[in-house]
Image (tube, helix red, strand yellow):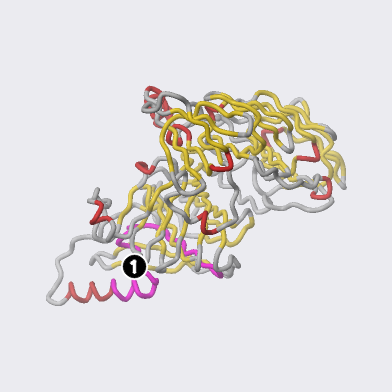
């Protein structure tokens, strides 16, 4: 089993953060919010809340609450292994599978000890997903992000409230970024953190129409200052206006992202462009051709988007909701940054491209990629288990009969196999062998862990450090909240609730 090692910078930040605990943030179902500190979970269920300016604890019924962001979204400890299992109710429980037979799966976790899960409650085990270190998971801290437009390429400065109201900006709430402006033209970016072989994954939600530009491997290079002949500046300005109009966007994408790739995501299709500047400072926008670019996402909805990019080889792949969509092959070579590869930087960002179209960006994950194509990753069938090896291409079907001593055993059509667990990326179990889930109880809560994990259940009891819940798949779980970043009390299907940026 390969354990993930987090960046030294992240470890240092966690150490400094631990010296001064941030306040928790309580969001109510009606949109109000309250800073303070979680004291515990009581029967009812209800939440006990403490503030420095109030002497006694305050009790709130969980039905009144939307979520609690713990410590400003920063964990006291991070789970060091990205291995996890997926249960029939949609949970993702991080841990290492130690044993498995036809009745149970034994999962060793850092946050809740050893858990035994009924075999028919598990649809997926992922010993080695993604293929590398987790470099970022959020967005929990808005200070890690920058907003830029054509007038503020280094970042929009802190403005007075009355000035900010007239400037279209992204708003951060809970663990998501929201775009709710009538105007467009402001990008939300992280200027570093994307490695040469990278996976960029995020959840996107939209209302009215989906039209979002996603930049990656961006260097945010400014256009070169080249002396223009008489009348040349006006010509260049007109070129930018024409380019912006063609992209349904008042800003030139090269001006915003520099040397970059920009994926334009629409409800029915997707396009990939290279952005750059020529020697005369003119912006270049070139479409990367592909044989298929169609999709069906609808006018309003949600999706999980995953971009995999390999700067040394030039491969770029797009997955939507775990399904492969399209792959582009760019020229590589020319040094360690890939001379034919347009993206020259380490940044990425988001830019909504049509007015009056609310968007939400959440669950952003940046990870290293081992370069495997992973074309079979999302495969799941009714009557056979699928084992996908970590090279991303070899897969085997049959019936998984057990796991022990670090090896998984599979009865296949053409023989029996044993696979070392470190060679397995994922195992998808046959749909027909997975138990049907019952409706979640009305008082169920969801606990989000860092950097991966979502566990749901009815709260039984808890304090500032521990929480005991009754999970529909596993049973009773007592978890250490040092690894948690959020408690969610409501699962809403209403766009009116989802798009309340102030919660």
Task: Please tell me in which quadrant of the rendered image residue 179 appears.
Answer: bottom left
**489 relative position to 472: left or right:** left
Q: Nearer the viewer, residue 119 or 81?
A: 119
Which quadrant would the N terminus be assigned to in this image? top right
Residue labelled with disc 1: 284
Residue 335 in view: no
- Nearer to the camera, 70 or 311: 70
Q: Position of residue 156 (x, y in %)?
A: 27, 52
Of 392 and 472, the residue lying toward us: 472
Residue 238's image quarter? bottom left
Q: How many marks?
A: 1
Mark 1 falls on what kind of element?
strand
Is 369 located above or below residue 110 in the figure?
Answer: below
In this view, 113 is above or below 372: above
Q: Does residue 146 show up?
A: yes
In the drawing, does residue 242 fall left or right of residue 425?
A: left
Residue 311: image location, x then y, percent:
46, 51
Q: Nearer the viewer, residue 439 or 396?
A: 439
Q: Residue furthest left?
A: 230
- The magenta segment: 240-269
Determine if the magenta segment contains residue 493: no
Q: Where in the figure is residue 324, as x and y percent of width and height?
A: 62, 58
Identified at 40% across, 68% down, the residue is 355
User: Magenta segment: does it hold 244?
Assistant: yes
Q: Position of residue 439 (x, y in %)?
A: 73, 47
Q: Who's the residue at 53% across and 44% down the image?
A: 66
Q: Residues within 10 Å of mark 1 (few under 14, many from 20)?
A: some
Quadrant in which residue 480 is drawn:
top right
Q: Is residue 328 left or right of residue 253?
A: right
């Amino acid at each position: 089993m390969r354990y993930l090692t987090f960046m030294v910078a992240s470890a240092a930040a966690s150490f400094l953060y631990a010296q001064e605990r941030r306040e928790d943030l309580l969001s109510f179902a009606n949109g109000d919010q309250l800073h303070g500190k979680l004291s515990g979970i009581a029967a009812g269920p209800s939440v006990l809340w403490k503030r420095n300016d109030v002497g006694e604890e305050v009790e709130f019924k969980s039905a009144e609450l939307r979520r609690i962001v713990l410590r400003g979204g920063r964990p006291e400890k991070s789970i060091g292994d990205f291995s996890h299992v997926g249960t029939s109710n949609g949970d993702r429980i991080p841990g290492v599978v130690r044993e498995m037979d036809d009745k149970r799966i034994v999962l060793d976790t850092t946050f809740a000890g050893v858990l035994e899960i009924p075999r028919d409650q598990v649809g997926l085990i992922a010993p080695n997903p993604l293929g590398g270190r987790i470099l970022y998971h959020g967005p929990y801290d808005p200070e890690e992000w920058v907003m830029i437009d054509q007038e503020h390429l280094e970042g929009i400065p802190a403005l007075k409230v009355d000035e900010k109201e007239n400037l279209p900006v992204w708003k951060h709430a809970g663990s998501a970024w929201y775009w709710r402006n009538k105007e467009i033209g402001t990008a939300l970016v992280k200027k570093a953190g994307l490695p040469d072989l990278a996976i960029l994954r995020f959840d996107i939600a939209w209302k009215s129409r989906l039209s979002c530009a996603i930049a990656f491997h961006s260097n945010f290079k400014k256009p070169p200052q080249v002396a223009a002949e008489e009348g040349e500046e006006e010509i260049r300005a007109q070129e930018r206006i024409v380019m912006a109009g063609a992209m349904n966007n008042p800003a030139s994408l090269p001006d915003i992202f520099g040397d970059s790739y920009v994926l334009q995501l629409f409800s029915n299709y997707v396009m990939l462009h290279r952005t750059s500047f020529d020697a005369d400072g003119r912006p270049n926008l070139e479409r990367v051709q592909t044989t298929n670019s169609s999709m069906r996402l609808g006018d309003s909805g949600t999706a999980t988007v995953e971009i995999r990019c390999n700067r040394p080889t030039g491969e770029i792949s797009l997955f939507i909701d775990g399904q492969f969509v399209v792959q582009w092959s760019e020229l590589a070579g020319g040094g360690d940054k890939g001379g034919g590869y347009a993206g020259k930087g380490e940044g990425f960002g988001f830019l909504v491209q049509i007015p009056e179209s609310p968007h939400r960006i959440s669950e952003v994950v940046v990870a290293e990629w081992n370069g495997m194509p992973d074309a079979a990753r999302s495969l799941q069938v009714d009557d056979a288990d699928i084992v996908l090896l970590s090279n991303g291409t070899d897969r085997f079907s049959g019936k998984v009969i057990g796991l022990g001593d670090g090896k998984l055993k599979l009865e296949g059509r053409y023989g029996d196999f044993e696979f070392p667990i470190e060679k397995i990326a994922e195992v998808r179990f046959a749909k027909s062998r997975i138990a049907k889930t019952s409706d979640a109880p009305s008082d169920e809560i969801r606990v989000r862990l860092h950097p991966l994990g979502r566990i749901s259940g009815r709260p039984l009891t808890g304090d500032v450090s521990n929480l005991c819940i009754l999970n529909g798949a596993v049973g009773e779980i007592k978890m250490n909240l040092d690894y948690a970043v959020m408690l969610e009390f409501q699962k809403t299907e209403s766009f009116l609730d989802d798009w309340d940026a102030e919660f």
